[in-house]
Image (spheres, rainbow, N blue to C red):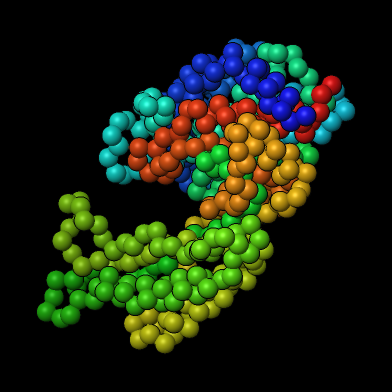
């Protein structure tokens, strides 16, 4: 019974709680920032590896630079994978149950430009929260999933199926390299849980996503101080943004469906950045030559992403042809990553959805929402490219990709309890 599995999970995890909190603090204090095309994930992977060794496990750190030779379409050609490693721990089952994969990324975005109350890598604990860059996205979830392996190893409890826990690189910035490398190396599993921060809800779907930069040049630097009119591309941005607004409205009219049926805006289009010079003293007082905007499209799991982007690009070409300025100043269309991310969706009656939902209900004392992620992630690689049924479930927190990010410590333990209880049910006993 699921209640027995929950009691067992709590019993196995209780002796580890202080160690897990300390591990989380150490991981947050480690700088594992990535940005295209590089990543500095090694300090975090090393801390995690040493922790697992101390708890009787044999972690494997392996290079992912073989991606640079891969012909898989999601092997990003603009990424440098030198000296970047995934970490994996595998606990063999008895062979009489289904296997389970837990997946999470160790890399973080850079610290937000806004001022943090404390250092982004402080790992400060206050009022049940642990603060720091990556605490919620997603080192809290990583600790929870590896807690499952530690608890099983310490207790000697053997599952019927194999358990594989992995910490991967290059998830931020639409990368997916670490997850892709892991699957090319070890593709099979009967189910997967990604421990992204979900506020203890179960996400059975994730969005697709594409980031597109639109840029153009104007004017002549040699004649910026002259008797004639100086063309500023910044003024022309206004009309381009009005064209963007037509697509914001168009995408807002997409009918919500499937796991996204209750989303008020299931397919948002957001303007992430507008640029034409900067308000800093290292830029001379001059009319800019260049202007750009960065757009972020999101898509439902069943949408034809490539076809929609082709339609958007055709619309942009029409707009430019009808505009006197842009007819003579071409707009460059540059994908931030290519191909775009896809969405994924797992049925609400799939056995893995039912199993994790029952475990979460028993652990939390009430039924968690079973809904959809408000963001893209690596889930589509696991489910659509490698046919592994995938759910997201992770701790509570706030501030992902922003200042004063935090994770609720108690929810990290609840995440571990839920995943362990689900593993006991899904994988079966020996």
The one nearer the camera, 226 or 115, is 115
**Where residue 331 sits in the image (x, y, percent)?**
42, 73
Q: Left or right: where does residue 276 sit relative to residue 139? A: left
Q: Which residue ends up furthest to the right in the rendered image?
A: 96
Instruction: Say if 358 sits above or below 239 in the image.
Output: above
Q: Quadrant of residue 332?
A: bottom left
Instruction: Say if 90 sits above or below 19 in the image.
Output: below
Q: Quadrant of the N terminus?
A: top right
Residue at position x 88%, y 28% in the image: 96
Q: Left or right: where does residue 391 sit relative to residue 338? A: right
Residue at position x 30%, y 31% in the image: 118
Residue at position x 21%, y 68% in the image: 287
The one nearer the camera, 362 or 320, is 362
Q: Quadrant of residue 218?
A: bottom left
**Where residue 284 sits in the image (x, y, percent)?**
17, 58
Q: Quadrant of residue 276?
A: bottom left
Q: Left or right: where does residue 42 sit relative to residue 92? A: left
Residue at position x 74%, y 30% in the image: 2
**Where residue 61 sits in the image (x, y, percent)?**
63, 26
The one nearer the camera, 122 or 172, is 122
Q: Which residue ends up furthest to the left in the rendered image?
A: 227
**Where residue 374 sits in the image (x, y, percent)?**
53, 53
Instruction: Say if 429 sits above or below 38 in the image.
Output: above
Instruction: Say if 100 sits above or below 311 in the image.
Output: above
Task: State whether residue 103 appears in this view.
Answer: no
Q: Left or right: where does residue 68 sit relative to residue 223? A: right
Q: Quadrant of the C terminus?
A: top right
Q: How many marks?
A: 0
Q: Which residue ends up furthest to the front in the rendered image?
A: 365
Task: State whether residue 425 appears in this view.
Answer: yes
């Amino acid at each position: 019974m699921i209640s027995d599995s929950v009691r067992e999970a709590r019993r196995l995890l209780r002796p580890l709680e202080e160690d897990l909190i300390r591990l989380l603090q150490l991981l947050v204090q480690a700088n594992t920032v990535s940005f295209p095309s590089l990543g500095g994930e090694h300090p975090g992977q090393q801390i995690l590896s040493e922790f697992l060794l101390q708890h009787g496990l044999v972690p494997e750190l392996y290079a992912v630079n073989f991606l640079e030779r891969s012909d898989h379409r999601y092997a990003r050609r603009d990424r440098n994978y030198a000296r970047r490693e995934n970490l994996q721990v595998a606990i063999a089952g008895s062979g009489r149950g289904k296997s389970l994969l837990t997946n999470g990324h160790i890399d973080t975005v850079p610290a937000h430009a806004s001022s943090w109350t404390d250092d982004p890598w402080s790992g400060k604990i206050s009022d049940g929260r642990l603060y720091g860059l990556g605490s919620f996205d997603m080192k809290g979830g990583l600790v929870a999933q590896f807690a499952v392996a530690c608890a099983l190893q310490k207790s000697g409890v053997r599952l019927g199926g194999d358990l594989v826990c992995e910490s991967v690189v290059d998830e931020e910035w639409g990368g997916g390299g670490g997850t892709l490398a892991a699957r090319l190396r070890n593709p099979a599993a009967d189910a997967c849980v990604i421990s992204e921060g979900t506020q203890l809800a179960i996400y059975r779907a994730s969005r697709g996503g594409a980031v597109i930069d639109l840029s153009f040049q104007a004017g002549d630097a040699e004649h910026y101080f002259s008797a004639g009119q100086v063309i500023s591309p910044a003024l022309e941005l206004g009309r381009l943004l009005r064209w963007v607004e037509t697509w914001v409205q168009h995408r807002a009219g997409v009918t919500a469906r499937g796991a996204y049926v209750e989303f008020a805006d299931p397919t948002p289009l957001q303007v992430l950045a507008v640029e034409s010079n900067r308000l800093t003293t290292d830029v001379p007082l001059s009319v800019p030559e260049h202007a750009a905007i960065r757009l972020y499209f999101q898509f439902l799991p069943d949408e034809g992403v490539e076809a929609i982007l082709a339609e958007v690009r055709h619309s942009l070409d029409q707009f430019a042809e009808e505009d006197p300025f842009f007819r003579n100043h071409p707009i460059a269309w540059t994908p931030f990553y290519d191909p775009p991310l896809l969405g994924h969706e797992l049925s609400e009656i799939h056995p893995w959805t039912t199993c994790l939902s029952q475990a979460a209900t028993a652990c939390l004392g009430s039924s968690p929402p079973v809904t959809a992620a408000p963001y893209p992630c690596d889930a589509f690689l696991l489910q659509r490219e490698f046919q592994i049924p995938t759910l997201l479930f992770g701790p509570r927190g706030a501030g992902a990709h922003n200042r004063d990010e935090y994770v609720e410590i108690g929810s990290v333990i609840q995440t571990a309890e839920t995943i362990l209880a689900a593993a006991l049910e899904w994988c079966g006993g020996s």
